[in-house]
Image: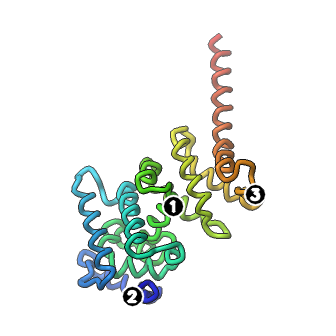
C-alpha cells in the first residue's frame, strides 16, 4: 500500500497551485481505497469536535484531538511506523490528495503546512508530536498534553538533533514537563530543549546514573533551582526591608 505512494515535490507544487486557484472547493472528488476510510474517519472526527461552538479549528485543542485520532488510525488500520512517517512524500500525498480541505480549514493557503515545510506539514507535525510524546495509552497521552500550546508542538518537532529523534528521551521530557509546567518559568520547555541539545554533545542520557529519567530531571532542575534561589533572595530582602 504505502510503497505505491509516490508524490514528488513537483507534483505537490502543481496540486497546491490548483487548490490555490479555488481553495473553497478543494475537497477531493474521489479518494481511492484504502485512504477513503482514513478520510471518512478523520472528517467525521473533525466535524464532531467542531459541533461544540466553544471549540475552534484554529486551535491547539484541535491539533491534539486530530493528532491522537490520526496516530491511532494509522497505526491500527494502516500499519504505519516511524520509517513511513519520515517520508515527506507520504505526508504531501495525504495533505494534498486526501485531506486538502481539512488542511486548508486549519491553516489556510500556507504551502509550508501543505507540502513545503517538511516538519511544518500540518499532518506530519501532529503525528510526530503524538509519537514523540506517547505515554503508553491515548488517555495518558491526552492527559499529559492537554494543557500545552502550539508552541510545544513546534519546539518538540523542530529539535530532532543530528542523530534524529530520540523517542524515549522526548517522551520523558514531555512527561516531566507536565509536572513542572505550572512553575511559572517563562518558556520552560523551550529552555529545557535548548539545554538538552547542548548537553547531548557531551552526555549520553542512558549512561547517566539513574538513566534517562534522572537526566531529564536534571535538565528541569537546572532552571527550577535558579527560580528557587531568586525566590529565596527576594524573601530575605523583603524581610530585611520590612524590619
Residue 161 position by quadrant: bottom right
Question: CA gap, disc 2 to disc 1?
Answer: 27 Å
Q: Which residue has dot 2 on it?
A: 14
Along the polypeptide, which appears first: circle 2 or circle 1?
A: 2
Can you give x and y, in whole percent of width and height, for residue 58 in the image?
A: 34, 59
Tell whether 51 sits left or right of 6: left
- Gap in angstroms between the C-alphas marked 3 and 2: 45 Å
Q: Which residue is mark 1?
A: 154
Image height of 52 relative to 184, above or below:
below
Quarter of the image for the N terminus: give it: bottom left
Where in the figure is residue 150, as x and y percent of width and height? 45, 56
Marked residue nearer the N-terminal end (3 or 1): 1
Circle 3 or circle 2, nearest the eye: 3
Could you tell me residue 25's position as x and y percent?
Answer: 23, 78
Residue drawn at point x = 71 percent, y = 48 percent: 210
Q: Position of residue 233 (x, y in %)?
A: 68, 26
42 relative to 14, above or below: above
Q: Secondary structure at mark 1?
A: helix
Q: Is residue 132 left or right of residue 204?
A: left
| Residue on which disc 3 sits | 203
Foreground residue among 108 and 90? 90
Visible residue check, residue 20: no
Q: Residue at x 54, y 64 (%)?
A: 157
Q: Quadrant of the C terminus?
A: top right
Decide if residue 130 is in sight here: yes
User: In the drawing, does residue 157 fall left or right of residue 210?
Assistant: left
User: Which residue: 68% across, 15% down?
Assistant: 240
* Quarter location, residue 75: bottom left
Badge 3 or badge 2: first in the primary sequence: 2
Amino acid at each position: 500500500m504505502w510503497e505505491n505512494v509516490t508524490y514528488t515535490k513537483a507534483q505537490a507544487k502543481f496540486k497546491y497551485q490548483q487548490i490555490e486557484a479555488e481553495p473553497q472547493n478543494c475537497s477531493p472528488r474521489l479518494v481511492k481505497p484504502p485512504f477513503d476510510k482514513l478520510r471518512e474517519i478523520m472528517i467525521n472526527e473533525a466535524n464532531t469536535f467542531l459541533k461544540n461552538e466553544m471549540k475552534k479549528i484554529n486551535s491547539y485543542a484541535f491539533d491534539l484531538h486530530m493528532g491522537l485520532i490520526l496516530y491511532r488510525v494509522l497505526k491500527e488500520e494502516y500499519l504505519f511506523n516511524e520509517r513511513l512517517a519520515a517520508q515527506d512524500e507520504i505526508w504531501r500525498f495525504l495533505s494534498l490528495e486526501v485531506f486538502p480541505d481539512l488542511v486548508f480549514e486549519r491553516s489556510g493557503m500556507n504551502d509550508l503546512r501543505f507540502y513545503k515545510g517538511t516538519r511544518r506539514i500540518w499532518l506530519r507535525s501532529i503525528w510526530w508530536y503524538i509519537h514523540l510524546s506517547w505515554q503508553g495509552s491515548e488517555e495518558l497521552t491526552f492527559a499529559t498534553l492537554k494543557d500545552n500550546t502550539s508552541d510545544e508542538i513546534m519546539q518538540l518537532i523542530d529539535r530532532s538533533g543530528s542523530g534524529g529523534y530520540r523517542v524515549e528521551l522526548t517522551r520523558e521530557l514531555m512527561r516531566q514537563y507536565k509536572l513542572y509546567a505550572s512553575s511559572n518559568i517563562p518558556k520552560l520547555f523551550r529552555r529545557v530543549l535548548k539545554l538538552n541539545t547542548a548537553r547531548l554533545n557531551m552526555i549520553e542520557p542512558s549512561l547517566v546514573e539513574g538513566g534517562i529519567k534522572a537526566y531529564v530531571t536534571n535538565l528541569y532542575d537546572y532552571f527550577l533551582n535558579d527560580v528557587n534561589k531568586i525566590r529565596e533572595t527576594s524573601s530575605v530582602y523583603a524581610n530585611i526591608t520590612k524590619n
